[in-house]
Image (cartoon, rainbow, N blue to C red):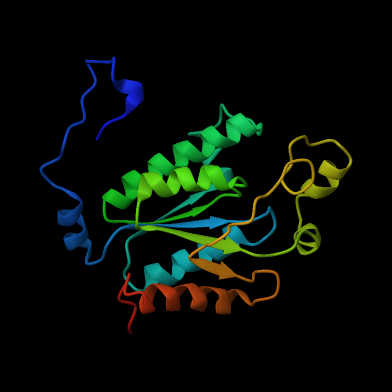
Amino acid sequence: MNNPNLENKTNIKWHESTINRQNLESLRGHKGMVLWFTGLSGSGKSTLANALNEALHSKKVSTYLLDGDNIRHGLCRDLGFSDKDREENIRRIGEVANLFMNAGIVTITAFVSPFRSDREKVRKIIGKDFIEIFCAANIDICEKRDTKGLYKKARLGEIKDFTGISSPYEIPKAPEIRVDTGSLDLNDSVRQIMKYLSEKELLDLDD
């Protein structure tokens, strides 16, 4: 694994484990992958990701959920919400998700991840097992769901660089899955994703 930023750091070397991804996937009984939820704040990313996590867990699938708010309590607590910090936030998450995936875990992430370029960088890190799930809910619906009052604060100028108000959200051009979270029932949303995973033979979800 080559990283151009490490070329002059001769004391850093990539170590291959004798237990590789294939060994771990065989142990778990399924492949690892990254299910990347993206959408506006209030679009239902975290709610849907958590519900999917429960559904997959009930099918004996090894999963781990990475949520945007939780990550900013620890790994990314030093980052703000400028474009540069958002880029670094997503880069870190991409690398962490890649580690989980290589452990044979179905890694579920729920991040606004507003910029296409950042999501594409993560896709390059993950490779063919990156599944982008766009939670499609328009901003009016997201504002109505906003229990934290973030949109109101953003419109009053109390929150800077807020996605959808003072910072852009770039809609995915070709996500693997588009879920109309603005109108679709939560259970139906979960079923849509489960159906995709099953039909694409990514996971065996038969009862």
Q: Is residue 90 visible?
A: yes
- Of 33 and 4, nearer the camera is 4
The answer to whether residue 97 is above or below residue 198 is above
Q: Quadrant of the C terminus?
A: bottom left
| Side of 165 relative to 206 (left or right) | right
Q: Is residue 62 left or right of residue 27?
A: right
Residue at (59% x, 59% y) in the render: 45
Residue 19: image x %, image y %?
13, 47
Residue at image coords 67%, 54%: 40
Q: Position of residue 68 (x, y in %)?
A: 56, 46
Which residue is pictured at 21% across the width and 59% down the height? 25
* Residue lying at the far bottom of the rendered structure: 207
Question: Between residues 101 and 57, which one lies in front from this camera angle?
Answer: 101
Q: Nearer the viewer, residue 4 or 145?
A: 4
**Which residue is located at x 80 percent, y 49 percent?**
151
Q: Which quadrant is home to the N terminus?
A: top left
Q: Could you say which is closer to the camera, residue 155 or residue 178?
A: 178
Place residue 44 in its image quadrant. bottom right
